[in-house]
Amino acid sequence: MLILGLNKTTLLDFPGHVAAALFIGGCNFRCPYCHNRDIVLKNEFLIPLTPEEIFAFLKKRRSVLTGVCITGGEPTLYPDLPELIRQIKELGYLIKLDSNGTNPQMLYNLIHTGLIDYCAMDIKNAPEKYEITIGFHNNQPKFDLAAIDESVQILMQQNLIPYEFRTTIVKELHDESDMLGISRWIAGADAYFLQSYTDSDGVLCDGYHAHSEETLQKYALLCRQSIPNTVLRGV
């Protein structure tokens, strides 16, 4: 397990909890608008945190924190993720997982063995535009959405934990037809969050922009036809 970052306190990442966030290095996507470039690319200047450092911190903070958010990168790339979570839960913490949905079998196991208490899954775009949104190019094999769709169904068909789907909306990548395609795909989901793109020094690629707030409100209204609990986040 490659842990490349620690946010010691967050009020935003785990709904209803004061939490810490662990950033797991590496990802199987290259979303050009991703703001965690160094984590995704596992830049060599980032010094990995040891398990001893993580658990020493978590033991000290049990009187303050109630949850740990495991994010990335893509945490489910690591076979030892369940064991890391198990050890954290032994300290009394609740666990939120952030995932792109490419490992449905691990997602299923984490839910059904009681290892995670909340899941946030990214929906990158409508199915027909997934490839360009995750950084796949014409010289690469066609991206198969089957694993993503399986993860969507796993979350929507279970009632063991709360979950959310979320999409970062980028002017150059998302339009009204895309939002309609997403909302039809995950129609009936418990919660769907639209997050506006924010430029930063850590973005994987330059040249992307946010839609206007008026456009984002329009997209939210459109999505609510299929997903009543559609919310704009951070706008």
Image: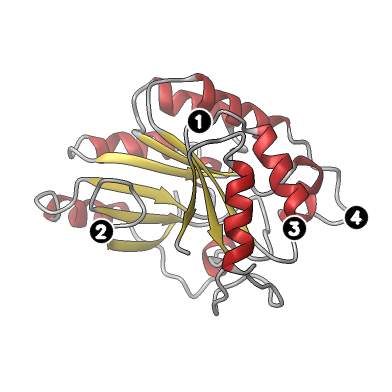
Amino acid type of the residue tagged 3 in the rendering: Gly
Task: Tell which circle, 3 or 2, labels the residue nearer the N-terminal end.
Answer: 2
Q: Of residues 143 and 207, which is closer to you in this image?
A: 207
Count residues near mark 2 (Cα–Cα under 10 Å), then give few for <14, some for 14-19, many for 20+: few
Q: Which residue is drawn at the image coordinates 55% and 67% (left, top)?
A: 35
Residue 121, placed above or below residue 2: above
Q: CA distance from mark 3 to mark 4?
A: 11 Å
Q: CA distance from mark 2 to mark 1?
A: 26 Å
Q: How is the image coloured?
A: secondary structure
Q: Which residue is drawn at the image coordinates 57% and 57% (left, top)?
A: 217
26 with respect to 179 (left or right): left
Mark 4: which secondary structure? loop
Across and down, in percent, residue 61 comes to 14, 55
Q: CA distance from mark 2 to mark 4?
A: 42 Å
Q: Which mark is residue 53?
A: 2
Q: Where does label 4 land, which residue?
A: 139
